[in-house]
Each structure stands twice: as C-alpha cells, then as structure tokens.
Image (cartoon, grey):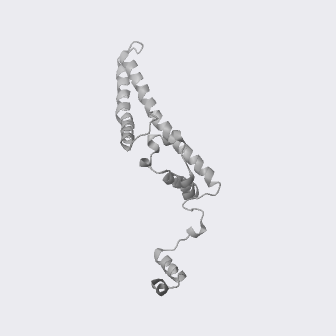
Amino acid sequence: MSKVPLTVTGAEKLRVELHRLKTVERPWVIGAIAEARAHGDLSENAEYDAAKERQGFIEGRIQEFVAGQRDLYRYLHDQTLRMMSHGMTPAEIGEALLMPNDLSRQWFARGYYGAVAHNVAAIYAHYLGPYDGNPAHLHPLTPTAAAHRYLKYMGGADAIVQ
C-alpha cells in the first residue's frame, strides 16, 4: 500500500478497489481455478497456474487492507483502555489520543471514515456503558427542569432581564 498521504478522492478509490477485489475479482478467480481443475492434470496446466497467481495477488491486497484496519483498531482499543485505567473520560481520551504516523497516514484512518473521538467513545461505552465517570450525569434533568433551576440560581427571571 502507498505510504503517501491521500486525498478524500484517493481514499474513495481505494475503498472501491477493496470492494471490487472482494465482490468481483475474488469470486471470478475462484471460478477460474475450478474451471482449470476440471481440465485435469494440474502439473502442466498454465490456466491453473495463472489463476492461482492472480488469487495470491488478490488475497495479498485484501490482507493489506484488513491488516491495516486491524492494527488501527487494536491501537485505538489498547490506548483507550490504558487511558480509562487512569480515570480519563471519553472526551479527554479522544482529545489526548494521537495516532502513530504509520497508522495516521493510512486511507482508512482519515476523518472521512470516522473520527478518533467517535471510536474512543464507542470503546469506552462498550466497557463502561454510557456512564462517563461524572455522577451528575447518572440522572440528568430534562431541559425544562434544568432551565427552571438555572433561572432559580440566577435570581429569577426578573433579575436576568434587568
């Protein structure tokens, strides 16, 4: 995979390539291998050799995409858990977590495919649920009830208008 930073258009082209490899080329090469096997002796079957070589390329390319995404999500997961164990909230983790250069340059790590803060919040919620560590957020007030309290704390509506 290219190590050059990509534009959104370039990332979209790679996404389309991955889809094409999985849905078009992989099934086609499987069919080509089956057809070549039907011809009999595989030791001198050029069609079989070509199809197997193409299959190796396709699977290798798919593996590059999948391995990169695996590494990205493993890093996000491990760092989120580490920071959770230090008492950080999802917002703090999302702000503090920086991706290593090798991962941040990959096309699937772009904000176009979801922000780091969103993934951190999902990982955090997986382990701790919606609780963010602030007891005041366990039973929040409705907007109307909160508005009445804000008015009361500020001395009433008449005091605010003046």
Q: Kindly give the residue lying farthest to the right in the view shown.
A: 86
Q: Kindly give the residue lying farthest to the front in the view shown.
A: 162
Q: Position of residue 139 (x, y in %)?
A: 55, 71
Displayed quadrant of residue 5: top left
5 sits to left or right of 76: left
Tell me which residue sits at (35%, 27%) in the image. Answer: 31
Q: Position of residue 143 (x, y in %)?
A: 47, 74
Q: Is residue 108 above or below residue 37?
A: below
Displayed quadrant of residue 88: bottom right
Q: Position of residue 72 (x, y in %)?
A: 52, 43
Q: Quadrant of the N terminus?
A: top left
> Is residue 126 among what the camera can see?
no
Q: Position of residue 104 (x, y in %)?
A: 50, 43
Q: Nearer the viewer, residue 13 or 137?
A: 13
> Is residue 137 among what the camera can see?
yes
Count numbered badges in the picture: 0
Q: Nearer the viewer, residue 45 or 152?
A: 152
Q: Nearer the viewer, residue 133 or 100?
A: 100
Tell me which residue sits at (54%, 61%) in the image. Answer: 130
Q: Kindly give the residue lying farthest to the top in the view shown.
A: 44
Q: Is residue 130 above or below residue 64?
A: below
